[in-house]
Image: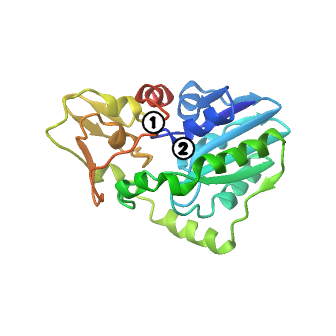
Amino acid sequence: MKILYFTATGNNLYVAKRIGDEYYSIPKLIKDGSFDFEDEKIGIIFPVYYIGVPKIVEDFLNKVRLKSKYIFVIATYGAFSGSTTRHLLEIGKRNGIEFSYINEIVMVDNYLPGFDMNKQVQEQSKKNIEENLEKIIKDIEEGRKYIKKHTIIREGLRVLADKFYDNKFEKNFSVDNNCNGCKTCERVCPVDNIKVDKKPVFNNNCQHCLSCIHNCPKRAISIKKEKNKVRFINENITLKEIIDSNN
């Protein structure tokens, strides 16, 4: 079983590791030009962005060639999964990908302008992450066929949200004097959008993942309208693993 994942703060890497032991980072696969995969089961794991599939994952699915009788998808989210299923089915139809299983799991959301990270972290236990993940793992092991349903109303909301996609998101970042030029932000960026001389410079291909902010060891990077300075990395994943996933 091969698992293809995208992670910013470790949630989706953790899910990938819990499901199987052969897992590959989507950003690295794109950089390497690796788009051909064949196995009995193939999984795709990613976070919900703009109540749909992240642009980096959609770009990957537009190019990938999957040969498997069982293709499954797990989407992680913090509060609202939007119309991820409908978005996936649309992408799959366009690219000849037939999904056998699509499900979702609520985890800690790292989107600082929308969520109080302190509250998100404190309420982890209420999300029943391990219990829900065990059910999903059992489904996959048994080869269960299941597609999580999302209504047409949700799809309308996704289309609306997509219209508000900020193509100049990098303008929302600021860096304070705590920055020591360590280049962690550069290394965790999944699309090489950050270059550090003395301080990070943000280019115009931001994926809105906020990996740079959450993984900064000095908490030197901020974003407009964030609720507080609390940051998050999945406790089961190391910074090195996140760097290795995206660098």
Few, some or many residues within 10 Å of mark 1 (<14, 14–19, 20+): some
Check the picture and name the quadrant holding the N terminus. top right
In contact (CB < 8 Å): disc 1 and disc 2: yes
Which residue shows up at 48% across the image and 32% down it?
237
Depth check, front residue: 154 or 196:
154
Image coordinates for residue 181, horizontal then vertical, percent: 22, 28
- The amino acid at mark 1 is Val
Which residue shows up at 32% across the image and 49% down it?
170
Position of 198 compared to 240: left or right? Answer: left
Position of 74 compared to 233: left or right? Answer: right
- Where disc 1 sits, the SS reads loop
Image coordinates for residue 200, horizontal then vertical, percent: 26, 35
Residue at which label 2 appears = 56
Residue farthest left in this picture: 177
Looking at the image, tell me whether mark 1 or mark 2 is earlier in sequence order.
Answer: 2
Image coordinates for residue 240, horizontal then vertical, percent: 43, 25
Few, some or many residues within 10 Å of mark 2 (<14, 14–19, 20+): some
Numbered circle sitting on residue 191: 1
- The amino acid at mark 2 is Ile
